[in-house]
Image: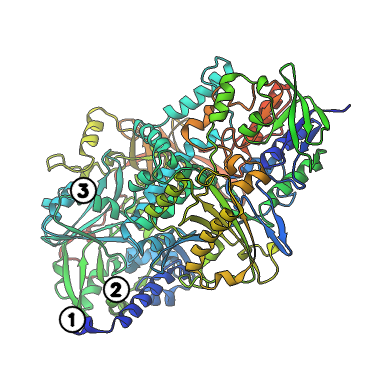
Amino acid sequence: MAQATRKKPVVTGADTALEARLAAQSHFRTLRLGTPFQPRIDALAKAQDWYNWAGYRAPHSLWDEELEYFAIRSQAALFDISPMTKYRIEGPGAEAFLNRVTLRDVTKLKPGRVHYTAWCDDAGFVLDDGTLFRLSPTRFRLCSQERHLPWLLDSAIGFEITVKEETEAVAGLALQGPTSFALLRDAGFAGVERLKIFDLAEFPHDGGAVTISRTGFTGDLGYELFVQAEKALSLWDRLMAAGELRGIRAIGYTALNRARLEAGLIVANADFTTAEHAIRADRLRMPDEIGLGFMIDLEKSHFNGRRAILEARTKRKLRHVLVGLEIEGNIPAEHAIVYHKKSQEVGLVSAAMWSPMAKRNIAIASLARPFGDTMVEDLWVEIYAMRELQYQKLMKRAKVVQRPFIKLDRRTTNPPADF
Amino acid sequence: MKAWDAIVIGGGHNGLVNACYLQRAGLDVLVVEKNDWVGGAATSRELTPGFLYSNCSYVCSLFRPEIMRDLELPRFGLQVISYEGGAVFTRDGDYLANYRDHDAHRREFARFSRRDAEAYDRYARDVTRQCRFIQPLLMRTAPDPTSLRPRDLGELLYLGKKFAGLTAEEMALTLRFWTMSISDFLDEYFETDVIKANFALSGIIGTALGPMSPGTAYVLLHHYMGEVDGSVGAWGYARGGMGAVTKALAASFKASGGTIRTGAEVDHVLVSRGKAKGVVLAGGEEIYGKLVVSNADVKRTFLKLVEEKELPDVFLRRVRNFKIRGSSGKVNIALDSLPEFPALPKDSPVYRGDMHFTDSMERMERAYDDWKAGRWSVDPFLDMVIPTTLDPTMAPPGKHFMSCFVQYAPPKVNGHDWTDADRDGFAESVIAQIAEYSPGFRDRIVHMEVRTPREIEAEVGLTEGNIFQGELTFDQLLFNRPVPGYAQYRSPVGGLYMCGSSTHPGGGVMGAPGRNAAAEILRDLAKSTSHMSPAHDVI
């Protein structure tokens, strides 16, 4: 067959090349791409409330964000994560390469496991955080908010690996919520009950395979499913059919964003500025300054930023700290300034909400050390609540608390419960 | 005999900006312009019936919004229409487009290199950082580093503080950036030749340097300045051509009581006892003024308009050595229909932006090689726009005006002055290049104006046709522009000031030199500058 193809007349080859070029050029006509699930999402998008997620048309909400939030916490929510940047890193040197690039010890990440990690530039500033999937001894998938191909390729010099961006080729879904396990089981993914938190496995689907991991961005029982783009719609339909009696609901980002905040998870370029995008030098952050210090493994072999991070730790040069806050009252403190003794400005709230699960007013904030670090008393936030064209200015006491703000046993229980 | 409070020589955009500010400060100001129209290098001229030619400057990108506001230019008719895209055509029949949308931009680059597509953010971040450092300096008078006056010390301190505010890494990067070549700079981010060529063009436009010459990275910055912090009118066409900018300035000037005399060429500046007293026109008429401001470039001002004996030797020598080398020309074309570019989809926004044909760094550098050898480029670099795709006022319905900025064109051809035959040969190199990408292009040409450095110097008065009134190299910037010791718009002749692009911060239709010069003049006169907005903060 291959030979036959090669023997085709040259003209046809040129035509095909031209057609391919014209097709590639035509992207300017559609500025926001649809994901492989778009036909299904469009059909459900009663609100027509879109935002731009990395060049894709993604929903803030499809119909009702309250219902969508409660689908995460009480039923099963289906969220399209296809726009997430995905890199396939493969080769005999993949483990050593990723161990060098990222903070956590990749030699401890066994095939069939996932971990949450981050990576830094040489000065120890965080380039991004993301999840690393070890699909086989020599094959990984790195998922992140921002794009890092030049960084990964430049770092790959000297390692026997290939790096390939597969954002468009691989479709992804997050299925989150208490009934997500039962739903997958009912959908016929035999053995899914064996997945413990951060496990992944491949399951047959529609003549191909779907990679299911017990991971998510909600702090709830949940899974993420990755499938070749061509099999995306059949996977969606399979889940929707199985989920009919389990309360499955497609959701937009607003609901997910609430759930992630309750789970105490941070979002790149919302809760911190990534190093390659920070125009102002003082916006750069080390892992210890955004709550990711736990990832740093000084026992493992050298990794990008190690020297700078170590120096900052020993010379006490860390200037910021990211903390969870519990704020009195019930008015969300989004982007409020944090004060010490109601007068000295010490930081900024990057995300805040009234948590329906915790029944508390919660927030994530970045503070200037020592505040939030060794000085945690007498912190306040100034909330400007716009009410019918007037700011109600509130000075509310804030208490530094542990994240996550809610801890759900069902997230980690084995086997997962049959809700 | 009437003595004006101020006489401004030259009705270019900086001369008019300067005159507007002085007039609004209560001075009685006269602008004398040798042509029968004002505008200098920012003009719109009907060279063939029905077609308005932006026959020199062709894009509005750098004009300071603070000046637009102070002089009420929108009220006086200035409308700027943004570019919608841009492209470099490649020799294999494809193109690399620039789109305004960030994601479309990335996808377009990814057609050539996924890696380079993703490298753009890092590149944009670093260029933005450099712009943020330099932009606040545009609307300030550069300090004299040899002076101990409190204001100079204060300004030096400001510069020093800004520099000290950088991290050690940023300082190193800034110093490298100001001195390195655009080619070396781009190599640090991109691998693909056409992508580098796409960005490099901003590093060479208007200079007699090639992409591999040190100092061209800064020139790129100069062109990007207009894009910082969302300045209105970043890269756009002035509706009605670039003359609309100076037309609005002239209207603003007249509305505040100013006087313009066109067809009044200055022969020389009247100097008595080391002080400027007025000007003498070519016809011999003397006009008296308490001070004189020259919008002409520094060479024209001090080598032609002022007698040598009035000037100190060192100053004269430095003015003579000031680099103001002719490097570019213009080919302005009236077309009876919109040219077709088979490579480009018909609905592409690129038609409404800037188009280029130089798809590699080597071609760009080779074009410069021709300049060094004293020839126009056989394979020139073009910055081509068709403003009538967005502005119907410049041509009859269905017809179009095309502006081609052409590089390189030497000030002299093989050591001799340009001849008409040279001019035609230069034009042919341009038309041949366009026709290669646009079949039938020649048949659409209704009228054409070809401007080599000879024509630009003769008509606009720019020495050697240099569009920036002097190279934007590090040795001719800030307190060294135009020459050390005279970077504050004053000159060795009392009461004679400079306000053209030869002065800080340099060329482009920015208006900052004219404005800064006005601030210095008003300071000397102890007049208020409260009608002058300070530079917008960069936060």
For the residues labelled 1 and 2, the Cα–Cα distance comes to 25 Å
The spot of residue A357 in percent (x, y) is 35, 56
For the residues labelled 3 and 2, the Cα–Cα distance comes to 28 Å
Q: Nearer the viewer, residue A92 or B367?
A: B367
Q: Chain of mark 3?
A: A
Q: Which residue is mark 1?
A: A2
| Front disc: 1 or 3 | 1
Q: Nearer the viewer, residue B1 or B23?
A: B1
Q: Is residue B144 left or right of residue B180?
A: right
Q: Which residue is mark 2?
A: A229
The answer as to whether the residues below labels 1 and 2 share one chain is yes
Label 3 CA crowd tier, 10 Å (few <14, some 14–19, many 20+): many
Q: Earlier in the sequence, mark 1 or mark 2?
A: 1
Q: Chain of mark 1?
A: A
Label 2 CA crowd tier, 10 Å (few <14, some 14–19, many 20+): some
Q: Residue at x 42, y 39 (%)?
A: A280
Q: Earlier in the sequence, mark 3 or mark 2?
A: 3
Q: Residue at x 46, y 56 (%)?
A: B378
Q: Nearer the viewer, residue B146 or A181?
A: B146
The spot of residue A341 in percent (x, y) is 44, 30
Describe the element under mark 1 as helix, strand or loop. Answer: helix
Identify the amino acid type marked 3. Val
Q: Which mark is residue A101?
A: 3
Is the C-beta separation of discs 3 and 2 under 8 Å?
Answer: no
Q: Is residue A273 visible?
A: no
Identify the amino acid type marked 1. Ala
